[in-house]
Amino acid sequence: MNKIAICGKGGSGKSVVVRLLAGGLRERGQRVLVVDADESNTGLHRMLGFKRPPEPLIGLLGGKQKLEEQLEAAVRAGTPEMSVELIHQEMQLSDIPPEYMFETNNGIRLINIGKILMALEGCACPMGIVSRSFLKKLRLEPDEVAVVDLEAGVEHFGRGVETSIDCVLVVVEPSIDSLEVAEKINELSAQISIADVWAVLNKITSDDIAERLRDYLDKRDMTVIGVIHQNQEIFESCLEGRPIQGSAATEDIDKILDFLFP
């Protein structure tokens, strides 16, 4: 299992879970790539300890405007948008220039697909297609794992990003909105034949809350593979915009990784 997509409702804590999983995988000796494919959330690089994000991968391919023109030309020529490929050759991590891929002191690497930075910039469709193409063409070694932070909600399913990953983890916080988004993600995953879709409960304050969420998801054929409890250290790190330390929620994350990598 080399490519893991993390998704869920906005505010559910996707990026925190990405950071915790990346740290846990690194502790187990895996070489970890974090892919920031959320074009609106800008805080993931800080959680990993970087002062700024790497240059957007979309820039390596010519920039958003050029890719939009390529996409429009392909569609005019009769190619369905879902079949458009903006990356045509297989890639390994060694092929990516260092300004487009940062690495932490403990060996976690970060790639940034791109962000919406200005008003009236237009849709994020090229970024979604770059995410899909990059994940499809990326070739990882057996000890390399990519953890992909997707945008909130379900739009990335419409762009086909999940067609290039191995499993989907849905982050669920204690709210009916989060549960309903998780249910929709499960339905959409089935439509593109992704069998491995699991839920991770986050921001959990009591066993009773966890059981209520688990019961809701069980009735909708979603398996909960782990619970991340409300953590003051994580809360303060997010509030202050500083790195989340590896010790945070270690026990909770270990149980999730034990399931994913038995």
Image (cartoon, rainbow, N blue to C red):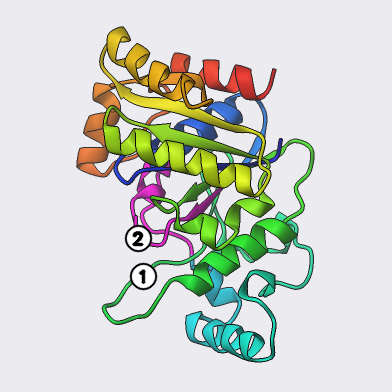
Image quadrant where one finds the N terminus: top right
**Where does the image place residue 143, in percent across and percent down from the top left?**
74, 35
Residue 116's tag is: 1
Residue drawn at x 34%, y 55% is 41
How many labels, in total? 2
- Circle 1 SS class: loop
**Where does the image place residue 72, in percent across and percent down from the top left?**
57, 87
* Residue 35: in magenta span: yes
Residue drawn at x 24%, y 23% is 232
Q: Say whether residue 244 is left or right of residue 72.
A: left
Instruction: Give 152 or 102, whichever is nearer the viewer.
Output: 152
Residue 247 visible here: yes
Instruction: Give 239 or 206, whichever is nearer the viewer.
Output: 206
Residue drawn at x 76%, y 73% is 88
At label 2, the amino acid type is: Ser
* Residue 223: in magenta span: no
Callout 1: 10 Å neighbours few (<14), some, many (20+)?
A: some
**Where does the image place residue 249, in percent across and percent down from the top left?**
40, 20
* Span shown in magenta: 33-54
Q: Which of the two labelled residues, at mark 1 and mark 2, occupies the earlier sequence position? A: 2
**Quarter of the figure with residue 95:** bottom right
- Circle 2 SS class: loop
Q: Which residue is mark 2?
A: 40
**Quarter of the figure with residue 205:** top left
Image quadrant where one finds the C terminus: top right
Instruction: Give 9 or 143, whichever is nearer the viewer.
Output: 9
Q: CA distance from mark 1 to mark 2?
A: 6 Å
Q: Residue furthest top?
A: 207
In the rendered view, would you say 59 is above or below 254? below
Residue 19 visible here: no
Label 1 close to label 2 by CB (< 8 Å): yes
